[in-house]
Amino acid sequence: MFASGVFGAVEDPWIRWSWVGGHLDVILAALGQHIQLTLIAVGLGLLIAVPLGLVAWRNSLVRGPIFSITGILYTIPSLALFSMLLPFTGLTVLTAEIGLVSYTLLILVRNIVVGLTSVPAEVREAARGMGYRPLGELVRIDLPLAIPAIMAGVRIATVTTIGLVTVTALIGEGGLGSLIYDGLLRDFKTPLVVGTVLSVLLAVMADLGLAGLQRLVTPWARTGRAA
Amino acid sequence: MNFAGQVLHWFLDPANWQGDAGVPHRTLEHLAMSGASVLVAAMIALPVGIAIGHYGRGGILAINISNIGRAVPSFAVLVIAVELFGIGALPAFIALVALAIPPMVTNSYIGMREVDPDVREAARGMGMRERAVLFRVELPIALPLVMAGVRTSAVNVVATATLAALVAWGGLGRFIVDGLGLQNYPMLFAGAVMVAVLSLAVEFALAGAQRLATPAGLRSTTSTQKEETAGTLDPAGIAA
Amino acid sequence: MRLERIFVLGASMVALALVTTSCGSTGGPSSSASSSPKGTITIASFNFSESIILAHIYGGALKNKGYTINYRDKLGNREIVEPALLNGQIDLYAGYAATDLDFVDGKQGVPLEAGSDAQANVQKLNARLNSKGVKALDPSAAVDQNAFAVTKAEADQNHLTKLSDLSSVASGWTLGGPPECPQRPFCQPGLQKTYGLNFKGFKSLDAGGPLTYAALKQGAINIGLVFSSDGGISANNFVVLQDDKHLEDADNIVPLIRSAVANGEVTSLLNSIDAKLNTPDLTGLNKSADVDKQDPADVAAGWLKGHGF
């Protein structure tokens, strides 16, 4: 149907390399914006999730509500969540980031809690026996041992966020999503394809990069099962 | 009237509950499309995932298909489907089926692999044929994870069906997209609330179904722990 | 030791983020490098190609005179763009005389007064908007107004040439158009009032864009709102039904600009552009963008060059 182009009989190939060559600046700008939006979302997400995770880990009363709320935020479809923010925060980066950060919280908090919970009790006993104060134990023993689970969460959160950033094209942001949206608005396949392919590549590279980072940061786990 | 009042007013207006553009019709449309896509996707994905898990071959593909699926933005899948098939319900359906398949393949595969080999051996030792081992031993044990995959897919589909309003389909997303176009923020917000409620309802309903499907003996923290360490647990799915 | 590694890696990720932030990312709206003494003008466009082209025609000419231009392309429909002009978020957009007048009248709750005289429409626009710090400049001869199209097959089958021919079939037909169509006097309500057409249903699509075209082609709608200067009408063999009862009024292109920005040079420049712009130009420009997939900005630049701006 669209294959021959809706606007006219002109064939619209799936990718016009001439357009790509002539629009490298637009493509790179979209890519840059996409990376920026993702980094801010995951970064802020971690900043919020770590204290939340620590509290949920220690305090079993609060754990339920924390998971419930982050779970609800996660289940709400992104377009709906962005739309609920619109009347209050407008068509701004803030709206996009509030939504994007909300989606990272459940995964990050849950994985932080799982990671910390999985530190064997004997190890913590030994640390206390060696004279570690609670804060020292947390920073030097518990958190490092929780890193595999936390990194797994960061990986999932990052890949998820990269996908969701495309939806922000509908509220004036977009990153690579603006290329996809442009393709829809103009019935123009090339930016659609470029936006999609780059988005997938970005997600794959981010995942691999973070996996590599995880390996670096947990040398003791290298002989173990892949996380 | 403040904003909350305007939204309430929208919900209370009987005109918004009538006809093809009314809430009941749009909700049914949304549910029907979501249900149909998940069903068809399950008919494709579950046999594949279960088979791969049973025979233990092609595991790398099964695990990674979910990661790849997560890496492809659902918005893009929708637009590509429209470029291929035109506007309307069909491309939306095809896109949704495509999006629903990966989590179900991965989770059923992992569910099957998590079956304790000893249990399998014991069953075979008891003289059970392969098919009996599959249906009477492996599947019941794998069922919670299989259901988790269906749950993930279902919530993903309900979410992406919201986006399908952008490509001239209907569903509850219509209120959001039209609200955006008309700058009618009460309608936009009302639509968003309805979509959120629907997604949560689907999530809870299927979570309940998952718990029911878990054999009594396994009904504890074990299944969730397995999902978590497997690193593929998506408790609510990628809400696109 | 482990801790240091974590800190180093964390720091490098932050550094990466900062580097990415500072270079290559220009965010949503595009902007020029630095401000010039003549100041910055923010130009918005609706979300269809013609509007983007016009914005870049105005902007390109102004840029050549030394102004810094900030584009907000595809900002939205009039419900988003017009308020943005009134509250100063944007400085200029290319309006359509009759539709903009009716929009303003509608918002102010006064009877709609747009007519088929472009000059009169613009005068009335100014009467309504000057007190709000906005001016309407000279209208162009170039016109783009709402048009309603059907497929050739449909037109042949039912012998349709004009809108009043629809009275016998309308009750079984579906109308397609942008989400605001049921509210716009030149769209669905107008068809009802002027032609007595009550359609069976309305499908919310886009403003004469790919969704509407696809819906017409696929038969999802029987009649769709398009724009009279669209590049794709003839290419798709659509038939525009004649507006024999003159529902559509003079929708000539007219710049709507904040008075604070409309100094002598800006005003005369924009007016001279309007004097040179005509409808065949518009149709050609639209075709280049929509059918040939050229960039609206490039298409605009081509027109400016060809007309000595």
Image (cartoon, rainbow, N blue to C red):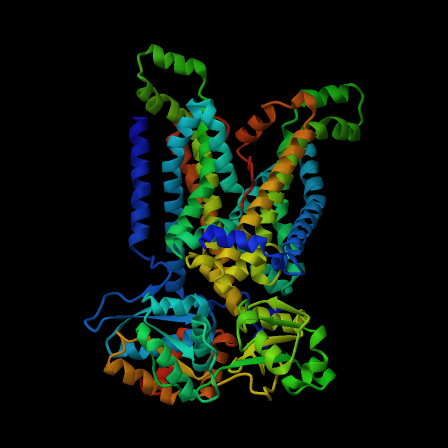
The image shows residue A85 at horizontal and vertical percentages of 44, 51
Is residue B172 visible from the viewing direction of this image? yes
- The residue most toward the top is A129
The quarter of the rendered structure image containing the N terminus of chain A is bottom right
Residue B111 vertical position relative to residue A207 in the rendered view, above or below: above
The image shows residue B233 at horizontal and vertical percentages of 55, 35
State left or right for residue C135 relative to residue C244: left
Residue A227 vertical position relative to residue A117 in the rendered view, above or below: below
Is residue C238 visible from the viewing direction of this image? no
The image shows residue B81 at horizontal and vertical percentages of 61, 59
Q: Residue at x 61, y 37 (%)?
A: B204
Frontmost residue, A30 versus C48: C48
Residue C242 vertical position relative to residue B237 in the rendered view, above or below: below
The image shows residue A146 at horizontal and vertical percentages of 42, 27
Frontmost residue, B56 versus B233: B233
Q: Residue at x 54, y 78 (%)?
A: C186
